[in-house]
Structure formats: structure tokens, C-alpha cells
Image (cartoon, grey):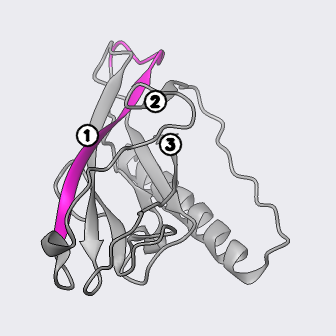
């Protein structure tokens, strides 16, 4: 019964995200509102920053990305929750949600900088590549154990070559939130 409720809620959350992504793709003059009402709330941070976090990627050589599919510049970042009320007797499943606005067909973040043939690829805590083409929910990556009030999950970002890159800047943006199950 609980598993069915969790599966239903995860499916509903993913459907809401996908619907919002489809709506924005179909109409540029639509404002979409999304939210959640829950008994649990936490403060969310990225690398300890609660507003406008920036992940500084290292400078890499074009030689490091000299063919399609190569990666370089692996950079860790931490999604954290704190100030949670938690449950003293049971675990609370909290999941990171990522939604990108400028996504490649392969599910990476497209570069809005001046370098060509370079994307930003996100890697989940389980070392699997995050495909942002259909949004992403971390499936309990921030689970609170009984009595806990904080949790964190380590993600990584890396440059991903889509061909022979040209030198230049690399910029990409990703929206984040958490969902409670």
C-alpha cells in the first residue's frame, strides 16, 4: 500500500514535470506553476548556497575533448537539505528534481557560451548519467533516516564533447528542487 502511494506520487511528479516541459515547448507565452503540499519541509542548498548557486568548472584543453563522447572536467557538487522535521520512527524519502530549459537530444545541458561542440553532462550519485530530456527525479537520494533533520547527495558535472570542440566559454543552467514522498 505504501509502495503504491510512493509509486503513484513519483509518477504524478514526473508527469507534472513532463507536462510543464511540453507546455513550455508548445507555447512561449504560458506561465506554468508547480508546487507541492506536504507535511515535511526542508531548506535546500547547493554546495551550501541557498540562492543562485554557481558551479565553477575547471578549464580543460580542447585536446581532452578531441572526439565525440569524450568527457573531461569532472566537478562535484552537493545537493543538501536541512532543517527538516523528520520522523522519529520511519525514514522520509526526499528526492532531488532537475529540470533543464536548454537540453540536447542526448539529455545534456546545451552550452550557451562561445565554445562549440561542448555540453554539460550531469552524473547522479550512483554514477549513472542523468538524462534531462525527460526531467530527472533522484529517487530518494536525500532520504532522512528516523530522527535525522538533514541529508545530502553528491552529483557531478562534466564537459561532454559532441564533436571536435572549439575554444571558448561554456555556460549552462539547470533548475533544481526537491520532492517529498
- Residue at the front extreme, as displayed: 167
Q: How many numbered marks does the figure carry?
A: 3
Q: Nearer the viewer, mark 1 or mark 3?
A: 1
Decide if residue 91 is on the left or right side of residue 64: right
Residue at the spot x=52%, y=59% of the render?
99
Magenta: predominant secondary structure element? strand
Question: Residue 145 versus residue 154: which sits nearer the camera?
Answer: 154
> Are circles 2 and 1 on residues that touch, CB within 8 Å?
no
Q: Residue at x 39, y 15 (%)?
A: 149
The CA distance from mark 3 to mark 2 is 14 Å
User: Which residue bears the numbered disc 2?
Assistant: 45
In screen coordinates, is 44 left or right of 138? right
Mark 2 closeness class: few <14, some 14–19, many ≥20 residues within 10 Å? some
> Gap in Å between the C-alphas at discs 2 and 1?
12 Å
Question: SS at mark 3?
Answer: strand
Left or right of 16 in this view: 57? left
Is residue 16 shown in magenta?
no
Q: Nearer the viewer, residue 95 or 176?
A: 176
In the rendered image of this protein, does residue 114 appear above or below residue 9?
below
Pointer 1 or 3: first along the chain: 1
In the image, residue 53 sits, relative to residue 19, either above or below, namely above
Upstream in the sequence, badge 2 or badge 1? 2
Q: Is residue 76 magenta?
A: yes
Is there a contact, CB below 8 Å, between mark 3 and mark 2? no
Q: Of the residues under marks 3 and 2, which one precedes in the sequence?
A: 2
Q: Quadrant of residue 111?
A: bottom left
The span picked out in magenta is: 71-89
Q: Which mark is residue 179?
A: 3
Amino acid at each position: 500500500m505504501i509502495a503504491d502511494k510512493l509509486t503513484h506520487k513519483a509518477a504524478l511528479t514526473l508527469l507534472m514535470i513532463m507536462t510543464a516541459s511540453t507546455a513550455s515547448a508548445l507555447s512561449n507565452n504560458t506561465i506554468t506553476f508547480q508546487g507541492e503540499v506536504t507535511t515535511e519541509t526542508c531548506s535546500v542548498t547547493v554546495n551550501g548556497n541557498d540562492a543562485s548557486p554557481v558551479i565553477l568548472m575547471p578549464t580543460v584543453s580542447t585536446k581532452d575533448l578531441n572526439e565525440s563522447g569524450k568527457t573531461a572536467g569532472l566537478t562535484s557538487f552537493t545537493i543538501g537539505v536541512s532543517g527538516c522535521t523528520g520522523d522519529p520512527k520511519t525514514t522520509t524519502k526526499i528526492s532531488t528534481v532537475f529540470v533543464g530549459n536548454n537540453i540536447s537530444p542526448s539529455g545534456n545541458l546545451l552550452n550557451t557560451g562561445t565554445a562549440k561542440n561542448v555540453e554539460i553532462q550531469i552524473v547522479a550519485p550512483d554514477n549513472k548519467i542523468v538524462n534531462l530530456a525527460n526531467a530527472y527525479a533522484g529517487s530518494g537520494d536525500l532520504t532522512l533516516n528516523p530522527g535525522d533533520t538533514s541529508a545530502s547527495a553528491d552529483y557531478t558535472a562534466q564537459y561532454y564533447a559532441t564533436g571536435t570542440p572549439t575554444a571558448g566559454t561554456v555556460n549552462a543552467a539547470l533548475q533544481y528542487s526537491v520532492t517529498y514522498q
